[in-house]
């Protein structure tokens, strides 16, 4: 599904599978800005807002987006302004706009997902989980072959197919609730990419793995299973609230492998890139200068690269990271993980490993608001950026590293 952190825009001549709502690329943004000045109508102003947002001028983006809303208070202008506000961490104002816009266009999955995420971010989980399931975890084609487990049916002696959703970080976040299903007697088959299944094969609450993708899952023989569910729907189906979240200990076990580094100095892993290759704005990924500032702040530690396929200058160890079992094994050998918001952050948190996470102004809903600690991962410390980007978060983390 499209990423809500990318400003949406309307291109009447180019309808997409989601109607006229699509996501602007960086070349398209530059072309719009170079073409002409915007016409005084909401569509043109909204497109100019998106273009300035993608090009990196948040102040102009906000100005055009607010003017578009003044001309037409519709679902498109409200969503656009909300997404741009979130880039600078103005989440509450953005949430109000999403809540106003969603009833105007209830089938818009980008808008519905943004509202669901916003409600969960501020702790309104009773309202947020149903919408999150609706927009992020819809049953899709599986409902033609299997009954969906709603959370009410007994799982004693039942086989349930749980399929992953979102990114790897989402999977690690929601896996925390699978042991509860196993304790109720469920036999769980987890469907996910092979790079994740090789690690999940070590987890006692998952009985079997299914290496598949959405395009192939419809070719399966579904007779071995009684139910299916998306892992992303478990928060809703289990009725989880912020008040009843209890840390029951690590729920991801890693393979034990040798580490070539001495224990006489801290061993610190760094992941500075997130999986944002398809998005025109890489909110989470650090620049090379930001990465180097972090490394320079702690010359007394032994740096380890946790960024797959990228070399970390000055690293003492560049472990092989072919799949998530490799990554988890490397994390297990470290004293601390420093990372941007990506699957590495959630994997380390699920393992109970000390992890410091750099959050951009547009931070994800799982990290809540304001606090420097995570509700869901006790070993996690959050470094939040003030406003757009990552600079202030990197500066704060560098100061903390100096004190190690």
Image (cartoon, rainbow, N blue to C red):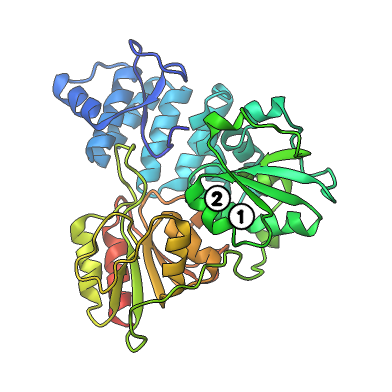
The residue sitting at 43% across, 62% down in the picture is 326
Q: Quadrant of the C terminus?
A: bottom left
Q: x, y percentage for residue 255?
A: 51, 68
Instruction: Identify the secondary structure beneath mark 2.
Output: helix
Q: Is residue 32 left or right of residue 21?
A: left
Q: Quadrant of residue 135?
A: top right
Residue at 39% x, 13% y: name it. Answer: 15
Give yes or no for contact between labels 1 and 2 (Cβ–Cβ under 8 Å).
yes
The image position of residue 66, as x and y in percent, is 35, 31
| Rendered residue at 75%/56% (across/down) | 182
Q: Which residue is mark 2?
A: 171
Percent x, y of residue 83: 40, 37
The image quadrant that residue 159 belongs to is top right
Q: CA distance from mark 1 to mark 2?
A: 6 Å
- The residue that mark 1 highlights is 175
> Along the line of sight, which residue is nearer the eye, 311 or 132?
311
Vertical order, 263 against 54 (above or below):
below
In the displayed image of the protein, which residue is found farthest to the top?
13
């Amino acid at each position: 599904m499209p990423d809500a952190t990318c400003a949406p825009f309307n291109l009447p001549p180019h309808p997409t599978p989601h109607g006229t709502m699509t996501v602007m690329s960086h070349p398209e943004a530059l072309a719009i800005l170079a073409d002409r000045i915007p016409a005084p109508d909401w569509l043109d102003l909204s497109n100019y807002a998106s273009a300035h947002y993608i090009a990196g001028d948040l102040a102009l983006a906000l100005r055009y987006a607010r003017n578009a809303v003044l001309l037409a208070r519709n679902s498109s202008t409200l969503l656009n302004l909300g997404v741009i506000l979130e880039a600078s961490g103005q989440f509450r104002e953005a949430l109000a706009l999403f809540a106003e816009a969603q009833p105007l266009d209830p089938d818009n999955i980008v808008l519905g997902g943004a509202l669901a995420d916003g409600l969960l971010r501020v702790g309104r989980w009773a309202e947020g989980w149903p919408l999150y399931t609706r927009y992020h975890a819809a049953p899709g084609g599986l409902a033609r072959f299997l009954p969906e487990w709603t959370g009410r049916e007994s799982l004693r002696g039942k086989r349930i197919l749980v399929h992953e959703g979102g990114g790897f970080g989402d999977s690690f976040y929601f896996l925390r609730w699978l042991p509860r299903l196993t304790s109720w007697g469920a036999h769980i088959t987890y469907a996910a990419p092979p790079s994740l299944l090789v690690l999940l094969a070590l987890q006692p609450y998952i009985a079997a793995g299914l290496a598949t993708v959405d395009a192939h899952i419809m070719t399966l023989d579904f007779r071995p299973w009684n139910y299916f569910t998306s892992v992303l729907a478990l928060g809703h189906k289990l009725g989880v609230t912020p008040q009843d979240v209890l840390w029951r200990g690590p729920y991801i076990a890693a393979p034990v492998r040798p580490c070539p580094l001495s224990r006489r100095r801290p061993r610190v892993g760094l992941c500075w890139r997130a999986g944002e290759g398809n998005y025109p704005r890489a909110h989470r990924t650090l620049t090379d200068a930001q990465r180097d500032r972090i490394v320079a702040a702690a010359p007394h530690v032994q740096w380890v690269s946790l960024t797959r396929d990228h070399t970390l200058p000055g690293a003492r160890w560049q472990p092989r990271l072919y799949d998530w079992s490799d990554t988890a094994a490397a994390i297990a050998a470290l004293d601390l993980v420093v990372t941007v918001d990506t699957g590495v952050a959630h994997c380390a948190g699920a393992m109970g490993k000390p992890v410091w996470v750099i959050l951009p102004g547009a931070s994800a809903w799982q990290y809540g608001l304001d606090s420097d600690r995570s509700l869901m991962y006790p070993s996690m410390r959050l470094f939040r950026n003030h406003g757009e980007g990552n600079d202030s978060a990197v500066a704060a983390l560098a100061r903390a590293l100096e004190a190690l």
